[in-house]
Amino acid sequence: MIVVTWGAVSDTGRVRARNEDAVLAQDPVFVVADGMGGYRGGATASRIAVETFREILDLPRVRAADIPPQLRAAHDAIRRQAGIEPASASMGTTAVGLTLVHEDGAAYWLAFNVGDSRLYRLHEGVLSQISVDHSYVQELVHAGFLAPDEARLHPERSVITRALGVADGSDADFWVFPAEAGERFLLCSDGLSGELDDVDIAAALTAGEGPQETAARLVTAANEAGGRDNISVIVVDVAGTPDAELDAPTADRPRSAPGSGAGSTPDPTSGSSPDPVPEIT
Ligand code: CA
């Protein structure tokens, strides 16, 4: 049985006037969306993406095949809204997600990505980036024209090559892998990964704190490093082991432990640090 706990924070940062990111953090669906495109458009697009993924929560058990249609639905809904609001005609959003799915009695993670929000996995002290950015600088890195550590500071680092809601280029990448006890995942918008390098991120993730405290720590660090963009972070911890009980007809979807989850226990000592955001911003 896999038991998932999590924490989430979405923060405007220190420079932007509005937060155009949106977050969905509720077992078994975790999504960070970073909107873009005109006045109000970005916030609308990211909110639509997250609202569309919220529908997954109504399913008794999520399967891998449930996710691609939801991405298409989010894309279509953003396109429809863009048609209604001329000022937001060019809006779109990134979406990086992690969903606990069940196939043949075993628990798997299905991860997906469109754009440059990111998914990282920490396991046995090793941090790895699972998602691959759909961005101009990632294309340069892939082609060998730019070193990976130069990409984070490149002047065109925020130019993305795919997004939901964009007419040409909304395809997602997918990854499927077994859920494993001891894993910790980080989903974030580029307001985090643009301010902190992998060493800083790994240090925060291994500081020995719970997921909510860790999410707050990461956002505080990104703000201290400049906070030039909206910063959204979800930290997901995995405990337990996959087993065949899930195949039993009466078995329910694995639930999170009581009291777990974002916002259930806001850190009273957080002071001026950002508010926990349990679901949508
Ligand atoms: Ca951003």
Image (cartoon, grey):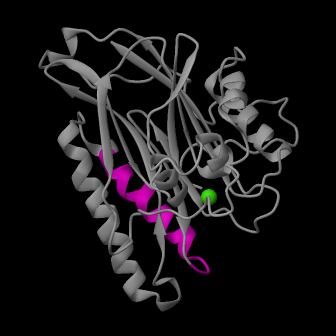
Number of labels in the image equals: 0
Give the side of residue 52 with respect to residue 16, left or right: left
- The percent coordinates of residue 240 (x first, y second) are 40, 9
Q: Quadrant of residue 243?
A: top left
* Residue plotted at (70% across, 27% down): 199
Magenta stretch, overall SS:
helix
Residue 109 lies, with reference to residue 183, above or below; the image says below
Give the side of residue 189 with respect to residue 219, left or right: left
* Residue plotted at (26% across, 46% down): 67
The stretch drawn in magenta includes residue 39: yes
Residue 109 lies, with reference to residue 2, above or below; the image says below
Question: Which residue extends farthest bottom?
Answer: 86
Extent of the magenta region: 38-56
* Residue plotted at (71% across, 25% down): 204
Query: Where does the N terminus fall, quadrant-wise?
Result: top left
Give the side of residue 198 with respect to residue 270, left or right: left
Q: Quadrant of residue 178?
A: top left
- The percent coordinates of residue 229 (x first, y second) are 71, 58
Residue 19 lies, with reference to residue 197, above or below; the image says below
Give the side of residue 182 with respect to residue 62, left or right: right
* Residue plotted at (51% across, 48% down): 141
Q: Name the residue nearer the viewer: 241 or 266.
A: 241
Query: Where does the C terminus fall, quadrant-wise?
Result: bottom right
Q: Name the residue nearer the viewer: 88 or 128.
A: 128
Residue 87 lies, with reference to residue 111, above or below; the image says below
The stretch drawn in magenta includes residue 25: no
Q: Is residue 280 visible?
A: no
Q: Quadrant of ligand 1?
A: bottom right
Q: Quadrant of residue 268?
A: top right
Q: Is residue 90 visible?
A: yes
- The percent coordinates of residue 4 (x first, y second) are 45, 22
